[in-house]
Amino acid sequence: MRADYSKGLIKQVEELTVENERLKTENKRLRGENRELSMRLTQLEATLEARIEAAVSSAVQKATAPLLAELAKKEEKIEILETEVSRLKAQINKNSDNSSQPPSQNERF
């Protein structure tokens, strides 16, 4: 009976050796696949970040364009009004000393 027992152990060892080799091969394949997937993930993340940045930039530009146009109009209007204020101040500050106005026309406050 002893011979049968040792044959069973040898058969189990052989089966485990074959299984171990199969698992080593599968492990090697899976590690390679993992490396490839990791590289692909890195590429996708970079692409995704670039796409998100472009989309955000476009959205910000689209949202701010009308505001910038309105701001430019208001700045132009401010310039016109400042010029008018300066002209009116100069007109108010005229008196007989700095214009051809007679002294009787000087305003008294």
Image (spheres, rainbow, N blue to C red):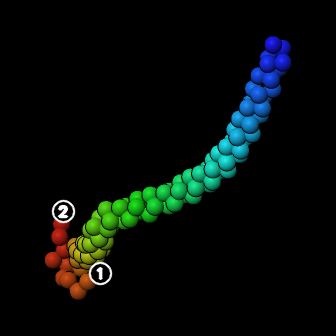
Name the kind of residue labelled 2 in the image: Phe
Q: Is there any visible trace of residue 24 in the rendered image?
A: yes
Which residue is at 44% across, 58% downward? 52
Q: Is residue 101 left or right of residue 31?
A: left
Q: Position of residue 2 (x, y in %)?
A: 84, 14
Q: Is residue 10 left or right of residue 92?
A: right
Q: Nearer the viewer, residue 82 or 49?
A: 49
Q: Is residue 99 left or right of residue 20?
A: left
Q: Which mark is residue 109?
A: 2
Q: Which mark is residue 98?
A: 1
Q: Residue furthest bottom?
A: 100
Q: Residues within 10 Å of mark 1 (few under 14, many from 20)?
A: few
Q: Residue furthest left?
A: 105
Q: Nearer the viewer, residue 48 or 69?
A: 48
Q: Residues within 10 Å of mark 2 (few under 14, many from 20)?
A: few
Mark-to-mark CA distance, 1 and 2: 18 Å
Name the kind of residue labelled 1 in the image: Asn
Q: Position of residue 25 (x, y in %)?
A: 71, 44
